[in-house]
Image (spheres, rainbow, N blue to C red):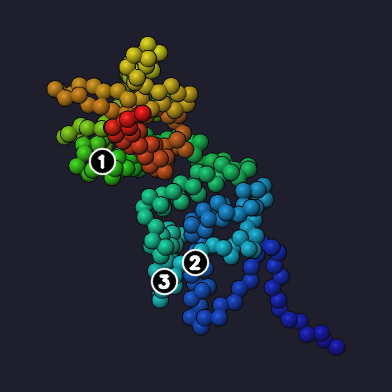
């Protein structure tokens, strides 16, 4: 006698079996788009109790909390890659560029750091512009987002620009330096200035003498002490105009020069400028 065998689905707490009651599969299509996107990885890492652990898994109730985009006819028709998935989910939930940058940087740099036994791309050395488009290097992207935040705060007509400093030879320093010029009319939005190691060392030494030495810091109020990261206010004369600049010095690791950090750093700078410019309240 043959015993009839019925197929079934056996799931652990990390897997979910679903059935879409919509005849067009609207719910399952929206779920497919959401769960294959960077947004789902961002959401689950931020909310799950098990994702950051040694053995990563999303529990059923946590997986079901992932927000789904609204369904639209043909929403999966022109998807051919994971990049298309991310583009669709970003448009579907109406994330701004700044919001999506936070998602991308979190998945690219934060999640690998949280997972044990995985090398993080954020600890690699930054790229130089030689041989590549200067717009795709980490410091160039950092500068672009930094200046955009400042212009969004103080006005797009402000002559805010940036200079990326690079070594001229193949032996790199362990730090990178970037200058954000707060008012330099006629200057290109981004310049890459190449100098040899001795020149770059000289520049760093002069910045230290002018802005970080205890004597100058006490008398002029310029400069901030630092351990691994330095933000130095300094100015120079160009023609007959004094150019105020913020020099940023950080380790030569990609995690220090992300677009999300650029927005945070620029926001802190803008806040400091606004607090300094605002009139002091009278005290009784």
**Which badge, 1 or 3, comes first in the chain's sequence?**
3
Against 226, residue 77 (above or below) is below
Q: Is residue 164 visible?
A: no
Q: Which mark is residue 68?
A: 2
**Which badge, 2 or 3, comes first in the chain's sequence?**
2
Disc 1 versus disc 3: distance between alpha carbons?
A: 39 Å
Q: Nearer the viewer, mark 1 or mark 3?
A: 1
* Badge 3: residue crowd in 10 Å (few <14, some 14–19, many ≥20): some
Disc 2 versus disc 3: distance between alpha carbons?
A: 13 Å
Which residue is the site of mark 3? 75
Determine contact: label 2, label 3, CB under 8 Å.
no
In this view, the residue farthest toward the left is: 240
Q: Which mark is residue 154?
A: 1
Image quarter in which the N terminus is found: bottom right
Q: What element carries label 1?
A: helix
User: Where residue 266 sits: x, y (%)?
Assistant: 35, 38
Against 148, residue 64 (above or below) is below
Left or right, residue 235 beside residue 44:
left
In this view, the residue farthest toward the top is: 215
């Amino acid at each position: 006698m043959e015993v009839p065998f019925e197929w079934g689905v056996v799931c652990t707490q990390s897997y979910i079996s679903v059935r879409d009651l919509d005849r067009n599969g609207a719910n399952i299509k929206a779920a497919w788009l959401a769960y294959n996107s960077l947004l789902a990885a961002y959401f689950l890492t931020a909310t799950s109790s098990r994702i950051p652990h040694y053995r990563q898994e999303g529990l059923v109730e946590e997986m079901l909390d992932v927000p789904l985009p609204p369904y639209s006819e043909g929403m999966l028709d022109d998807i051919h890659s994971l990049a298309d998935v991310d583009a669709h989910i970003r448009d579907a939930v109406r994330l701004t560029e700044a919001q999506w940058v936070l998602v991308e940087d979190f998945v690219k740099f934060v999640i690998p750091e949280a997972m044990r036994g995985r090398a993080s791309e954020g600890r690699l050395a930054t790229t130089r512009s030689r041989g590549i488009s200067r717009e795709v290097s980490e410091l160039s992207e950092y500068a672009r987002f930094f200046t955009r935040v400042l212009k969004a705060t103080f006005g797009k007509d402000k002559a805010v620009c940036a200079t990326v400093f690079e070594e001229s030879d193949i032996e790199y320093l362990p730090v990178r330096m970037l200058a954000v010029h707060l008012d330099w009319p006629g200057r290109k939005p981004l310049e890459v200035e190449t100098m040899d190691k001795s020149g770059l060392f000289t520049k760093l030494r002069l910045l230290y003498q002018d802005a970080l030495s205890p004597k100058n810091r006490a008398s002029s109020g310029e400069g901030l002490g630092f351990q691994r990261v330095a933000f130095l206010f300094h100015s120079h004369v160009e023609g007959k105009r004094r150019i105020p600049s913020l020099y940023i010095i950080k380790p030569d690791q990609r995690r220090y020069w992300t677009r999300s950090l650029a927005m945070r750093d620029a926001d802190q700078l803008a806040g400091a400028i606004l607090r300094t410019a605002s009139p002091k309240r009278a005290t009784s």
